[in-house]
Amino acid sequence: MLGYRFIGAALAAASFAALPSAGVAQQKMVLKATDVHALGYPTVEAVVRMGAKLEKATKGRLSIQMFPAMQLGGEKEMIEQAQVGALQFARVSSGPLGPVVDEVNVFTLPFMFRDEAHMRKVIDGPIGAEILAKITAHPSAGLVGLAWMDGGTRSVYTKRPIKSPADLKGLKIRMMGNPIFVETMNAMGGTGMSMGFQELYNALKTGVVDGAENNPPSLLTQNHYQVTKFYSLTGHLILPEILLFSKKTWSGMSKADQDLIRKYSREAQFEQRKLWDAFVADSNAKLKAAGVQFVEVDKKVFYDATKPVRDKYGAKYAALMKRVEATK
Ligand code: GTR
């Protein structure tokens, strides 16, 4: 409790130090950034590199201080801290953002994208820009949508192979905090349990959950593979990740600084992707070397099983979903 309050106080705002007789545009600012992943992970590295560019372009007036590895809590907490201006950059999954900005949920539906190339086309193009603008324009979210990042494809991992919904029966599978994901897992045959990423390793280890689902880099870097040796390639979610900024801080910045941050964020989107592709290949190799078994799955069965979830949550976004589907 005390520790948390201490962090809260320490982060009460970006550090501002006005230069002598300078206006808003000239304030020196240390922008706080956070991510659940550790230094070196592609999403973290892309933001760290962006910090170096910002610092160079502004001769040190703007810089980024990275708090990696869940130092500031899980993604729900990260979003809340960005909302109050206690931090500036929050790199989170679309998953926990869906409950805050509903349109984002279009990206969180199971089997929404045909493959990763399709997802990239969508986030790089007009639909991606539109959803970022919706986040920024949301009247109470208190966030600015800056850029998308690649979160690859998520599949189920447990202590046994999963080939069909029947194999998931009776298994508690951790999902991210968004009702869509819990319902997705239930539709896939298991029992979805929503839980923060920060609690997951222990939950797997102690058997509070029987498994989880994620991309290969997370399975590896969070050490989940040490507990769950079967990676069943359900590929039920191809889930974009996102770089958010605190609207509270944003609104006090000059247009020129905002433009600079937007420009470098867009560059970070593509820089992260390059790092991501290499990181996924490396993670797959390491997982296999560690004895993790990759289980081929007939995805069609899970696709069909999750239709009710797409129907239920997608109905109000039918037009948008059609446009996503039509993106080639
Ligand atoms: C990772 C993702 C994180 C977070 C995490 C989770 O793949 O990079 O942003 O969403 O999964 O499952 O909570």
Image (tube, grey):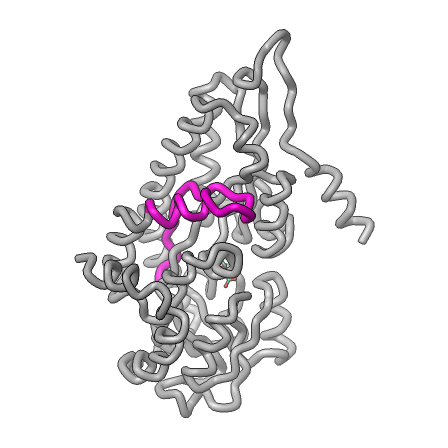
Image quarter for residue 154? bottom left
Tell me where residue 166 appears, x and y as whole percent: 41, 92
Residue 303 is covered by the magenta coloring: no
* Up/down of 19 relative to 56, above or below: above
The quarter of the rendered structure image containing the C terminus is bottom left
At horizontal 42% and vertical 57% (from top left) the residue drawn is: 104
The quarter of the rendered structure image containing the N terminus is bottom right
Tell me where residue 69 appears, x and y as whole percent: 58, 51
* Up/down of 322 relative to 27, above or below: below
Is residue 288 visible to the viewer in this orientation of the structure? Answer: no
At horizontal 34% and vertical 79% (from top left) the residue drawn is: 307
* Pick the front one: 121 or 157: 121
Residue 148 is covered by the magenta coloring: yes
* Up/down of 222 relative to 72, above or below: below
In the rendered image, the residue lying farthest to the right is 2
Q: Which residues are magenta?
A: 129-153
Count up the numbered dots: 0
